[in-house]
Image (cartoon, helix red, strand yellow):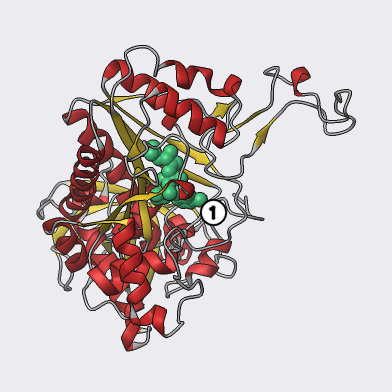
Amino acid sequence: MSLSISKILTMTPSDEVVSVNGWVRTKRSSKNVSFVALNDGSTIRNLQLVVDTEKGYEGVTEEVMTQVTTGASISASGKLVASQGSGQAVELLCEKITVIGIADPDEYPLQPKKHSLEFLREIGHLRFRTNVFGAILRVRHALTFAIHKFFNDRGFFNIHTPIITGSDCEGAGEMFRVTTLPDQNPPLTDDGHVDFSKDFFGKATNLTVSGQLEAELAATALSKVYTFGPTFRAENSNTSRHLAEFWMIEPEVAFADIKDNMDLAEEFLKYLIGYALENCVDDMEFLSKRYAEEEKLKPQAERDEMSLIEKLEFVRKNSFERVTYTQAIEILMNCPMNKKKKFQYPVERWGIDLQSEHERYLVEKHFKKPVIVTDYPKECKAFYMRANTDGKTVAAMDILVPGVGEIIGGSQREERYEQLKQRAEEFKIPQESIWWYLDIRKFGSVVHSGFGLGFERLLMFVTGMGNVRDVSPFPRTPKTAEF
Ligand code: 4AD
Ligand code: MG
């Protein structure tokens, strides 16, 4: 039976023959002995194969070895021996090697050297085979599991909210239309618009921007629920933090106010960071080294003084700063950056939207730790957030973290029917599109709160990657939907 490399590397030398499958990372040869670094993705570590063509093993010939090149898939078997070299406890003394699939060295684009992340995006079908993407995808998997575990352990139920939706109540961004109408000569209404009553669902439909509104329905019955699914936003923002398709985790809790919401969000982030540090040790060490190398390339003033692991440990062990929007604006208005006119968007008055440069100033320069900003002006936020008694602000909360900016957005929801109805009118949201959302405020309405964590933003933070395109296996951004 063949074993995974992660398993083999925990074993001790023995006379038993083991076999292993994987892809060749490197081969170095001296005289009649070759050393092959083999990787099967089960771990970032490679298994060293020792191939001695003069030992007389029938299964290892010079001829086979010419095809054992970087990228080729092979199967190898032999005995585990104590490693002569450093870096690993055991290596495989090969008695047999079979080439499964060759990789022509003149054509295979991944060479055993450092490639730029930009280049790797162009060969997105092969970048899975690099150390950095292997590490990221293993961490991504581990955190997916940890998210379900966190909520399951706390009595939450996972709700699958729809991907195709007929409403854009969220107002979170431009939506992608879903239609089966013909692109040539679609049916038109009398006033010349596309007649969506003839469309598949009998009305205009889109890909969802958030599962929140539906999660609220479930929360007002199951008390504690969460969604974890893909969301889609057709914003034309080509930044290092925006994807057109991203995954979001949205818990929604009945009988919970904004304070409970903040506590849950903080506990959740700390749990996930801890999970990655404890369960992805090799990958996190690799990513931390990589992060340090990247930081070294930056000018001194912009460099992160902490290593990635130190930074995450710090975040995990210290409480997040909690400030109101009003306090945040005061800090920003009076900060040297603003006074020296160094912000692209100067902070001149209460009521402005916080730009990512402002958010990053707060976390990276001012507080030097994650910050929860609460109580935003109602004009800056969605219609469903609960109005505060001051008449100006709503019970919103955004969590900002160093290097990423906004990682979580959430709020206490407006649970009062009349107030919500009025807010919907102010936002020009047609009643008929959200009658069901208003309805739950009529029957057994309760205080409830929730938030959305952008999964790729979380991954950027945990892996230290600077571009959201590099933490998604198949990033979708304006003008790119390759692979
Ligand atoms: O702040 P947002 O828009 O909040 C909502 O959608 C609410 N319905 C959440 C809720 O209360 N249940 O998005 C939540 C998070 C952001 O903080 C950010 O981390 C991430 O989703 N996000 C994106 N991530 C990648 N690409 C984009 N285009 C993103 N837009 C938002
Ligand atoms: Mg937001």
In the image, residue 400 above or below residue 113: above
Q: Between 383 and 463, which is closer to the camera in this rendering?
A: 383
Q: Residues within 10 Å of mark 1 (few under 14, many from 20)?
A: few
Residue 31 visible, this angle: no
* Residue 253, image x, y percentages: 27, 29
Q: Give residue 175's quadrant in the image.
A: top right
Q: Amino acid at mark 1?
A: His
* Residue 479, image x, y percentages: 67, 55
Q: Between 476 and 63, which is closer to the camera in this rendering?
A: 476
Which quadrant is the N terminus positioned in?
top left
- The residue at 24%/34% (across/down) is 257
* Residue 358, image x, y percentages: 40, 67
* Residue 394, image x, y percentages: 37, 43
- The residue at 30%/70% (across/down) is 331
Q: Between 186 and 263, which is closer to the camera in this rendering?
A: 263
**Is 65 left or right of 301, judged from the image as shown?**
right
Q: Between 14 and 274, which is closer to the camera in this rendering?
A: 274
- The residue at 45%/81% (across/down) is 342
Location of mark 1 (residue): 125
